Amino acid sequence: ILNVEQSPQSLHVQEGDSTNFTCSFPSSNFYALHWYRWETAKSPEALFVMTLNGDEKKKGRISATLNTKEGYSYLYIKGSQPEDSATYLCALINTGNQFYFGTGTSLTVIP
Amino acid sequence: ETGVTQSPTHLIKTRGQQVTLRCSSQSGHNTVSWYQQALGQGPQFIFQYYREEENGRGNFPPRFSGLQFPNYSSELNVNALELDDSALYLCASASGFSSYNEQFFGPGTRLTVL
């Protein structure tokens, strides 16, 4: 069983603030890393699929980086909006095609 | 394009019973994964099916089994239900074999075992 850790567990920011959170994982047997956003009463929504060390991906105000050698990924949100309030999950996929999710970072953006 | 659907939405069973949960993939997707999410935890990977064959399994006992059909819909079967099986069960579909592809999740089935 692989341990995927996300920090912080929860976060409250003011509208307009930029924020970031971390996903840490064991770097051995790395295959891919997924980021998801999960809003209350909805289904998880894929944000990014990251595969290569040094990958940087961006979708609107949200971006992510990946360091497979040291075993971490950062998710950044620029200029947070209330609609960004959600739980952000990362999932490590290993070479055995097993998925390991973290427990998520719960983000609340205060108007 | 139809999204991922799951049935039923909610289900109550008693300990020792068996349950079947169903998932219809998004159109064009041939990979389905199942997850269990207990309260306060992240989703736990149960298994994945690609073109009707199991293609990866998490640390769940054999009483958790699955099927994928030729139309790529899928079932999750759980035998001899235990209280700890109470959870939200999510399925997700994707296009292709590789875990490099985005997954699209269904709304989940909430299972309560009494």
Image: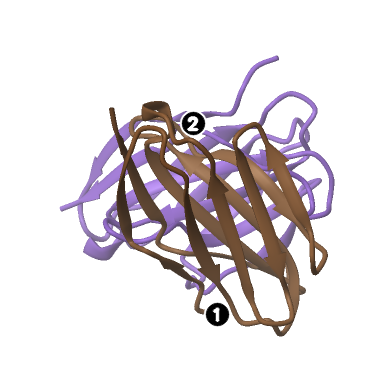
Chain colours: A brown, B purple
**Chain letter, disc 1 residue:** A
Would you call the spot at circle 2 few (<14 residues within 10 Å), some (14-19), or many (20 or more)? many
Query: Spatial distance from mark 1 to mark 2, Cα to Cα?
Result: 28 Å
Residue B53 seen in render:
no
Q: Which residue is mark 2?
A: B6
Residue B91: x and y in percent read 54, 43
Residue at the image position 64 percent from the left and 46 percent from the top: A63
Does residue B106 sit above or below B62 in this rendering? above
Q: Nearer the viewer, residue A26 or B18?
A: A26
Q: Residue shown at 46%/66% (left/top)?
A: B63
Query: Tag on residue A105?
Result: none
Tell me the kind of residue under disc 2. Answer: Gln
Question: Would residue B50 be found to the left or right of residue B24 on screen?
Answer: right
Residue drawn at (66%, 42%) of the image: B103
Element assignment for label 1:
loop
> What residue is pinned by disc 1?
A2
Residue at the extreme left: B114
The quarter holding residue B2 reads: top right
Question: Can you say whether B83 is above or below B25 in the image?
Answer: below
Q: Quadrant of residue A45?
A: top right
Chain to which the residue tagged by mark 2 belongs: B
Q: Residue at x 66, y 39 (%)?
A: B93
- Circle 1: residue type: Leu
